[in-house]
Image (spheres, coloured by chain):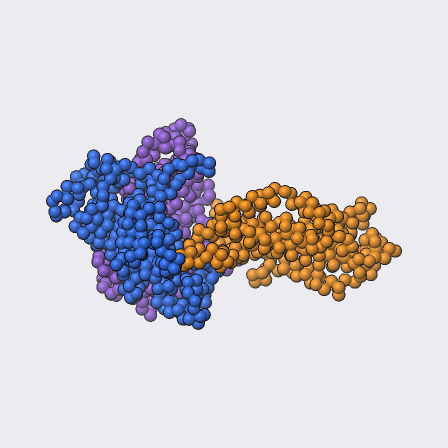
């Protein structure tokens, strides 16, 4: 059974023109996406500004309510949960955010910060809370005396550990990691990523991992979903997707991820233009104005996600292959940018 | 060619003039604290320290100048006023009034303003609209005139003045605190508290309040000066703390006719006291602002 | 044929001093670097490495608390350290230009794009307004902004982040500088936009014969864009040399650990090599080598004395005792394999 399963999930916002203006249009921040996260696995979401990954994380966390579609937690539809069920959901889904300096209340001691979810949701004796806090500090690799200190006495990497300890305090099933290491120094990122992987192995946690560092996402995730303008264009097993992307946008994205060795030559695909505004997405396939492989059909009809060799891809390039099995990967483009 | 300013030998030395501004022993601003401490001391031990009764005068001893002038005596160190009351004793008892009114009004205004600022900033919606329109209206009225108006209605007494001043000045807090709350609300630790399941009131109490207290304190010290001057003005205009209580502002009012005929001590001394207290409060507020805001701290 | 380098830093030091003269932070500590005309140098470092202070020092735009306390900055044969304010003003924007990380902060929201691109041209070359605006339009075309004629009259908030960064680039090259310093120019950009932008920079460099100094924490950008690399740690250059050589055989344990700690795209189940400890606190540096507390190959000697800059190979330096020549003729003694 999946920990989280989303089906046709949407979140639309209404944009207004100024203070007195009428409806300027609808921002389809998330427009009919479907994904599933299994127990003990990580789903990575990649995409650029405006793709909807942050809104998706807020939907999963319950910070925003969907305007369409369903989300199931361990099989139960979230809309149909009663108060106890909603509380249970809250306890099972926690988060770690990007900015280690803004994630901790500067006026609270570490022990209070880590214990807050516990104290809010369960009735425990002070001694028991303290014991749990110390246990969590140990799990994330911080010394016990850290409990009585304040956030400003810790570095960025250490603060993220504290944030992770807090997220773990309720023994959640899923942790939403929204750019957990982007604000940290490069030499510290590896520490935190290793810690997250160890915790996943030990505790059977599931992660929703959102980051713009493709290599980190590919490293941490079992499955990757690529989002563009509110829709998922490709989903697949992480390594396979990184090595052989099927959707032209995924291909461009991974080619833009910088090489790690100066002698390593990667085919450079430079996309023209800017990411269009979510207020006025292009017709048909939303990517077609920038797609180096666009065909006439792409401007007319939107492609649907279909399964191709273990991945889900939404692209007209694969329409013909419904009939013929055996997909080849994308042919290199005839002329380079 | 002289060496440019950013290329210089170590260590850098500050000019003498600027250094005086920062006289410190260790980290603390000695002078303002000393001034306020002395005034507080006088206020508390007024009964013991004042040589004479501040409210009752001997009419035959009117308009004695301070002791170092001809006609003065050490009996009345700083001279006497038009009713023969000892100026020094009145100053000492006046300190009590200024301190009590000043601090209490500031705390009262601070409490009301901070709470309203937090609630309106965090809850938003109609609560915010209501409080903000109220604040706007209140702020549109000129503070002193409004205070006079209120004093005329409820009648003068020390505690009425405290309440009036509190009621007039809370809006400044509300505005500033609300602004801070608006940005605090978006900080990730608040979002995480929501994710952890905390209620709105818990968040306001545990996360928002402690983070705005600093601003409220700094604002308080700066408002102290304003409130003291306001109290003095009210007394000067005759609607403040009623006579014969020796408020400094009242002493100024009483003494102003004497100024024309050369009885300078009747106004200079109380005026000087007001100035010293406000100066001390402002300097302290400045120091606190830097001390409590980590971003402004120097290397 | 070795031409004189365009820019040569010789034991440059910039310290931050507190008003009382007590606390001294050695933000840039005896840095020596060299950039040749048309070359790209990458300066890599994390927080506390001093790379941003170095950038500010180069243009002499340091905050009041900072002082250049020693060394020389030779630019085209002249020492920038001894120049007066007026002379530096001639150089800034005209011979050396700089672009920063946040394009929104670099552009004045109240002036049109054309105005801002034309400004350095008017200031430095004193041409007429119409000439400057014409040049501005050409520059916008050069940085591949579509429909420059209309864009020239628009304001910064009407443009996307990628376009703004390109405009900042246009301002940078407007007076044909010899050297362009880019301080984290792509950190705020989306990946595909970043790719566009870096390509643009490379083309501009080739067309104008620019020397480029790229200051970044991202080794990927260095691998793609730079010929030479200097790695900074705690205010010092701890390794420098050709990019390819350093990536293939890093001489300093910090560089090696940095390279190993970055997740690689094709590597399945690779366990990242983490560097233990925290970045250095410049106000309280340990004696000896500043990397010693975190170094996986630390020796007792490292804590006693800070290593000087050794030359493990022609054209490379490394501040590490491990790179010390053991006997005459031995060069690189890289502890390879040990991580």
In this view, which residue lies farthest toward the right? B60
The letter of the purple chain is C
Q: Position of residue C147 (x, y in %)?
A: 33, 31
* Number of on-image labels: 0
Judge left or right: residue B176 versus residue B191: right
Corner quadrant of residue C281: bottom left
Q: Position of residue C285 (x, y in %)?
A: 41, 63
Query: Quadrant of the image for the N terminus of chain A?
Result: bottom left
Query: Quadrant of the image for the C terminus of chain A?
Result: top left
* B279 or C55, nearer to the observer: B279
Q: Colour of chain A?
A: blue
Q: Position of residue B227 (x, y in %)?
A: 65, 51
Q: Position of residue C45 (x, y in %)?
A: 34, 55
Residue at the image position 41 percent from the left and 63 percent from the top: A121
Residue at the image position 77 percent from the left and 59 percent from the top: B89
Q: Tell me if I can see residue C17 in this picture.
A: no
Q: Colour of chain B?
A: orange
* C294 or A314, nearer to the observer: A314
Residue at the image position 24 percent from the left and 58 percent from the top: C249
Judge left or right: residue B63 versus residue C175: right
* C315 or B123, nearer to the observer: B123
Corner quadrant of residue B221: bottom right
């Amino acid at each position: 059974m999946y920990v989280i399963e989303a089906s046709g999930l949407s979140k639309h916002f209404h944009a207004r023109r100024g203070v007195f203006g009428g409806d300027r249009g609808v921002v389809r921040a998330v427009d009919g996406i479907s994904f599933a996260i299994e127990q003990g696995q990580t789903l990575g979401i990649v995409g650029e500004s405006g793709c909807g990954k942050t809104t998706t994380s807020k939907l999963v966390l319950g910070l925003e309510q969907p305007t369409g579609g369903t989300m199931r937690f361990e099989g139960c539809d979230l809309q149909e949960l009663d108060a106890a069920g909603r509380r249970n959901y809250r306890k099972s889904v926690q988060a770690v955010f990007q900015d280690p300096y803004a994630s901790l209340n500067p006026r609270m001691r570490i022990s209070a910060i880590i214990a807050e979810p516990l104290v809010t949701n369960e009735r425990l004796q002070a001694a028991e809370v303290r014991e749990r806090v110390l246990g969590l500090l140990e799990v994330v690799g911080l010394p016990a005396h850290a409990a009585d200190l304040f956030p400003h006495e810790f570095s960025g990497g250490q603060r993220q550990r504290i944030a992770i300890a807090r997220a773990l305090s309720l023994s959640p099933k899923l942790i939403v990691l929204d750019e957990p290491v982007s604000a940290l120094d490069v030499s510290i990122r590896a520490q935190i990523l290793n810690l997250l992987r160890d915790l996943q192995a030990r505790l059977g946690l599931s992660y929703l991992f959102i980051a713009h560092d493709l290599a980190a996402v590919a490293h941490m995730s079992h499955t990757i979903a690529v989002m563009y303008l509110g829709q998922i264009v490709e989903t697949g097993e992480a390594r396979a997707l990184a090595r052989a992307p099927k959707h032209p946008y995924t291909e461009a994205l991974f080619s833009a991820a910088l090489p790690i060795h100066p002698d390593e030559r990667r085919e450079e695909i430079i996309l023209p233009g800017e990411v269009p505004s979510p207020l006025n997405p292009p017709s048909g396939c939303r990517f077609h104005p920038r797609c180096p492989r666009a065909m006439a059909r792409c401007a007319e009809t939107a492609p649907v996600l279909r399964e191709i060799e273990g991945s889900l891809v939404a692209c007209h390039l694969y329409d013909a292959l419904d009939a013929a099995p055996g997909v080849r990967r994308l042919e290199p483009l005839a002329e380079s940018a | 060619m002289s060496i440019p300013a950013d290329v210089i030998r170590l260590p850098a030395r500050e000019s003498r003039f600027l250094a005086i501004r920062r006289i410190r022993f260790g980290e603390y601003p000695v002078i303002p604290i000393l001034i306020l401490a002395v005034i507080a001391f006088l206020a508390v031990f007024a009964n013991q320290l004042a040589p004479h009764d501040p409210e009752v005068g001997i009419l035959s001893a009117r308009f004695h100048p301070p002791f170092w002038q001809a006609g003065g005596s050490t009996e009345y160190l700083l001279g006497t006023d038009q009713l023969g009351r000892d100026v020094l004793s009145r100053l000492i008892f006046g300190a009590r009034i200024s301190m009590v009114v000043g601090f209490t009004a500031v705390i009262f205004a601070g409490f009301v303003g901070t709470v309203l600022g937090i609630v309106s900033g965090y809850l938003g919606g109609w609560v915010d609209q209501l409080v903000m329109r109220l604040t706007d209206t209140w702020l549109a009225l000129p503070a002193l005139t409004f205070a006079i108006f209120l004093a005329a209605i409820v009648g003068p007494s020390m505690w009425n003045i405290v309440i009036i001043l509190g009621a007039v000045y809370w809006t400044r807090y509300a505005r500033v605190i609300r602004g801070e709350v608006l940005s605090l609300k978006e900080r990730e630790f608040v979002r995480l508290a929501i994710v952890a399941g905390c209620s709105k009131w818990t968040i306001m109490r545990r996360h928002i309040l402690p983070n705005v207290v600093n601003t409220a304190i700094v604002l308080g010290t700066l408002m102290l000066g304003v409130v003291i001057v306001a109290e003095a003005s009210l007394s000067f205009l005759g609607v403040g703390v009623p006579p014969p209580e020796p408020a400094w502002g009242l002493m100024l009012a009483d003494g102003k006719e004497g100024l024309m005929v050369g009885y300078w001590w009747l106004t200079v001394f109380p005026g000087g006291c007001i100035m010293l207290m406000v100066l001390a409060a402002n300097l302290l507020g400045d120091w606190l602002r830097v001390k409590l805001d980590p971003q402004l701290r120097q290397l | 044929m070795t031409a004189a380098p365009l820019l040569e830093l010789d034991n440059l030091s910039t310290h931050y001093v507190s008003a009382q003269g007590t606390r001294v932070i050695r933000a840039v500590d005896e840095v020596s670097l060299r950039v040749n005309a048309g070359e790209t140098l990458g300066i890599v470092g994390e927080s506390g490495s001093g790379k941003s202070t170095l950038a500010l020092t180069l243009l002499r735009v340091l905050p009041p608390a900072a002082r250049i306390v020693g060394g020389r900055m030779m630019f085209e044969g002249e020492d920038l350290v001894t120049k007066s304010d007026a002379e530096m003003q001639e150089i800034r924007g005209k011979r050396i230009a700089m672009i920063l990380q946040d394009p929104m902060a670099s552009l004045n929201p109240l002036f049109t794009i054309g105005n801002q691109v034309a400004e350095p041209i008017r200031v430095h070359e004193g041409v007429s307004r119409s000439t400057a605006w014409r040049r501005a339009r050409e520059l916008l075309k050069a940085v591949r902004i579509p429909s420059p004629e209309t864009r020239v009259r628009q304001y910064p908030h009407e443009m996307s982040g990628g376009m703004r960064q390109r405009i900042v680039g246009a301002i940078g090259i407007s007076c044909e500088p010899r050297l362009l310093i880019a301080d984290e120019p792509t950190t705020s950009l989306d990946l595909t936009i970043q790719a566009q932008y870096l390509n643009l920079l490379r083309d501009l460099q080739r067309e104008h014969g620019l020397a480029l100094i790229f200051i970044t924490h991202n080794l990927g950008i260095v691998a793609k864009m730079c010929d030479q690399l200097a790695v900074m740690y705690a205010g010092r250059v701890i390794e420098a040399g050709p990019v390819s050589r350093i990536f293939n055989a890093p001489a300093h344990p910090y560089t090696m650990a940095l390279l190993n700690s970055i997740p690689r795209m094709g590597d399945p189940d690779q366990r990242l090599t983490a560097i233990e400890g925290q970045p250095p606190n410049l106000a309280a540096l340990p004696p000896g080598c500043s990397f010693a507390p975190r170094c996986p190959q630390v020796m007792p000697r490292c804590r006693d004395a800070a290593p000087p800059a050794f030359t493990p190979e022609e054209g490379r330096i490394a501040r590490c005792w491990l790179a010390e020549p053991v006997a005459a003729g031995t060069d690189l003694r890289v502890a390879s394999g040990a991580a």
